[in-house]
Amino acid sequence: MKKTLISLVSLLVLLTTLPCEAQEIAIPNRPPEKEEKLEKQDIPFARFSKGENDLSIKAGIYGIFTMTPMLSPQAHFSYERCLMDGLTKKGKGSIGLGGSVGLGLVFGTLYIPITAKVSYHHQVLPKLDLYGSTDLGVALVYACFNNDGKGFRCGVDGVFSFSAYAGANYFFTKRFALKAEVGYGYSIVNLGVNFRF
């Protein structure tokens, strides 16, 4: 009889402890799953973070060279690297430094601006990056002209090149965005694509 009572008591103790152990194991595993889901939903595609790189390809019209406005198609290739981020109270501002190369043909004259580039980026929305940029450098000018009836003479010269733009990148993925710019320089309006890596 005693053995039977001892066995019943032992069984009851075992049954009462099992749910508590299962509960203790299950509860700690729930919060991390929720945190991971929130992190995936709140990824700021447009934030330009320190160490990241932007490569842009864009085209525009109505370029300004040697202080003279000229209507012509222009192509631009630019690169910049984020050197500083976490600016402003919410940490959405960043500074980039890089370079740019342009290519334009105006009335048979070829312009190739080669400049250094500095920009300030600010993430306005999770997928929208607004920025302002300034380029300083030199534009190589290749032109041919009539040499007093002795045929055409061609030569290369260099002129000061300056441009300033306000623009926006809209990111469809973490690595790809469409870009639009307005300002003064190689061209007044630019449209293109941006690759971030």
Image (cartoon, rainbow, N blue to C red):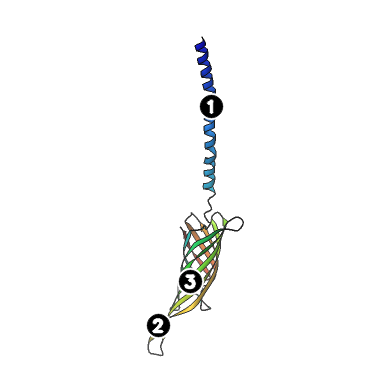
- Tell me which amino acid carries mark 2: Cys
Nearest to N terminus: mark 3 or mark 2: 3
Residue at 52% in and 22% down = 15
**Percent position (x, y) of residue 138?**
48, 75
Residue under pointer 1: 19
- Label 3 or label 2, whichever lies nearer to me, is 3
- Dots 1, 2 in contact, CB < 8 A: no
- Label 3 or label 1, whichever lies nearer to me, is 1
- Work out whether 43 lies above or below 160: above
Inter-mark Cα distance, 3 to 2: 24 Å
Inter-mark Cα distance, 1 to 2: 90 Å
- Label 1 or label 2, whichever lies nearer to me, is 1
SS type, badge 3: strand
Residue at 54% in and 43% down = 35
Residue at 41% in and 82% down = 155
Residue under pointer 2: 154
- Tell me which amino acid carries mark 3: Thr
Q: Residues within 10 Å of mark 1 (few under 14, many from 20)?
A: few
Residue under pointer 3: 115
